[in-house]
Image: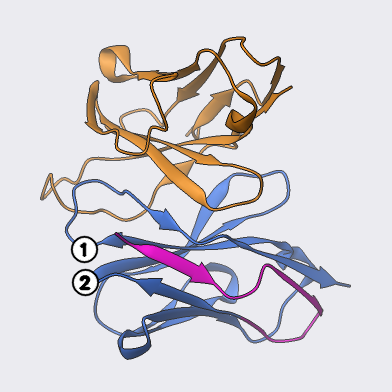
Amino acid sequence: EAGVTQFPSHSVIEKGQTVTLRCDPISGHDNLYWYRRVMGKEIKFLLHFVKESKQDESGMPNNRFLAERTGGTYSTLKVQPAELEDSGVYFCASSPRSQTDPSANTGELFFGEGSRLTVL
Amino acid sequence: AQSVSQHNHHVILSEAASLELGCNYSYGGTVNLFWYVQYPGQHLQLLLKYFSGDPLVKGIKGFEAEFIKSKFSFNLRKPSVQWSDTAEYFCAVTAWGAAGNKLTFGGGTRVLVKP
């Protein structure tokens, strides 16, 4: 079974440019999450999709960040325009929907290897 | 809001030594607790988790963790490390019963095991 895949693995762009990160979750996983780790600090939650709907986007830093999950499959995270402080590693994770209780916390997240973004 | 504190940023030890990584969390309600590990060049993966029941939980690769509610702690242990345990370890929590898995992570501890 394929795991969570992210593309690109590393992107180097200049301040003011646009970058789009893509995440393909594990097939059948309704939950998709984006997290970010900046400069060796904590991994921080950005947002959570359930299928194509945004369940929680409380961690999105500002309106330069736009996440989509059209059709409830893969997701993209666009940063436009990028700023220096956006540099970091962006992790995507997925998890299945609980079979017994849709609101239950099922625990394990399956992470991708991350997309490293460097803004110069 | 939840927060997680990991006591050490870097740990260096020799093979066969014992490892204990500290983790304390701050949250007023019931939590679920996790340890994730990221080996060099690999993705984050779950080592172990605690939801309820026996506060001593066992995970993969010989790791275990003990939940001490009174101390808001969830320390990770391994009696005898191997070179292959070189990795970064993350403690994480989520509010019990919360929809989805909105994890709050600690800052991570880099562990280097010298052969």
Give the residue at x 41% y 32%.
A26
Which chain corresponds to the colour orange? A
Query: In which quarter of the view is residue A105 placed?
Result: bottom left
Looking at the image, the residue that sits furthest to the right is B115
Horizontal placement of A5 versus A66: left or right?
Answer: right
Q: Where residue B10 appears, x then y in whole percent?
A: 73, 69
- Which chain did the renderer colour blue? B
**Marks 2, 1 in one chain:** yes
Label 2 sits on a secondary structure element that is loop
How far across and how far down the image is residue A80, in percent?
51, 13
For this orientation, the residue located farthest to the bottom is B70
**SS label for mark 1:** loop
Three-letter residue code for mark 2? Thr
Q: Are the residues at dot 2 and dot 1 in contact (C-beta closer than 8 Å)?
A: yes
Task: Using the rendered view, name the quadrant where residue B66 is placed.
Answer: bottom left
Q: Is residue A27 above or below residue A91?
A: above
**Which one is nearer the viewer's eye here, A71 or A43?**
A43
- Which residue carries the number 2 mark? B30
Measure how far apart labels 2 and 1 are at the Cα level.
5 Å
The answer to whether residue A40 is seen in the rendering is: yes
Check the image and report above or below for A78 versus A89.
above
- Residue drawn at x 74%, y 22% as measured from the top left: A120
**Looking at the image, residue A57 lies above or below residue A109:** above
Identity, as a three-letter code, of the amino acid under mark 1: Trp
Q: What is the magenta range? A: B1-20
Give the residue number, with chain letter if any, for mark 1.
B96
Structural crowding at the residue carrying mark 1, measured as other residues with C-alpha within 10 Å and reported as few (<14), some (14–19) or many (≥20): some
| Residue A100, label in figure | none
Residue A119 colored in magenta in the image: no
Check if residue B9 falls in the magenta segment: yes
